[in-house]
Amino acid sequence: MSLSEAFTNQHMKKWIEGWNTHDIKTVLSMYSENMNSPVPKSKLYFQIVMYLK
């Protein structure tokens, strides 16, 4: 699957803005529900945010 440069730039800007403003909901909303992360806490945070939706 190929992503356009415009989509990629928009996605990166959204992620960086969420990260820099400590908006965990925005950051985690950009990941799949069945993500596989080497950082155990990231999956826990994701599950909490999905529960709160």
Image (cartoon, rainbow, N blue to C red):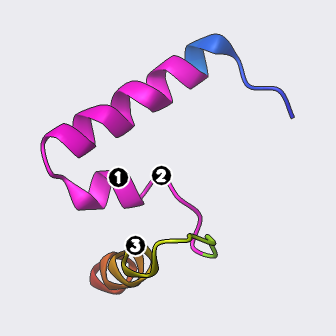
Q: What residue sits right under mark 1 in the picture?
A: 27
Q: Quadrant of the C terminus?
A: bottom left
Q: Is residue 33 above or below residue 28?
A: below
Q: Position of residue 8 (x, y in %)?
A: 58, 23
Judged by its main secondary structure, the magenta piece is: helix
Assign the N terminus to one quadrant of the image.
Answer: top right
The span from disc 2 to disc 3 (Cα, nearest Å) is 13 Å
Indicate the position of residue 17 as horizontal and vertical percent values: 24, 33
Where residue 6 appears, as percent x and y from the top left, is 57, 13
Q: Is residue 10 magenta?
A: yes
Seen from this angle, which residue lies furthest front?
A: 38
Question: Is 29 left or right of 25, judged from the image as shown?
Answer: right
Q: Circle 2 — which element?
A: loop
Q: CA distance from mark 1 to mark 3?
A: 11 Å
SS for dot 3:
helix
From this viewpoint, which residue is outermost toward the right?
1
Residue type at mark 3 is: Ser
Which numbered disc flags the more N-terminal residue, 1 or 3? 1
Residue position for label 3: 42
Residue 30, numbered circle: 2
Amino acid tagged 2: Met
Give percent across and percent down for residue 30: 47, 52
**Do labels 1 and 3 touch, CB within 8 Å?**
no
Residue 14 falls left or right of residue 33: left
- What are the residue bounds of the magenta stretch? 8-33
The amino acid type of the residue labelled 1 equals: Val
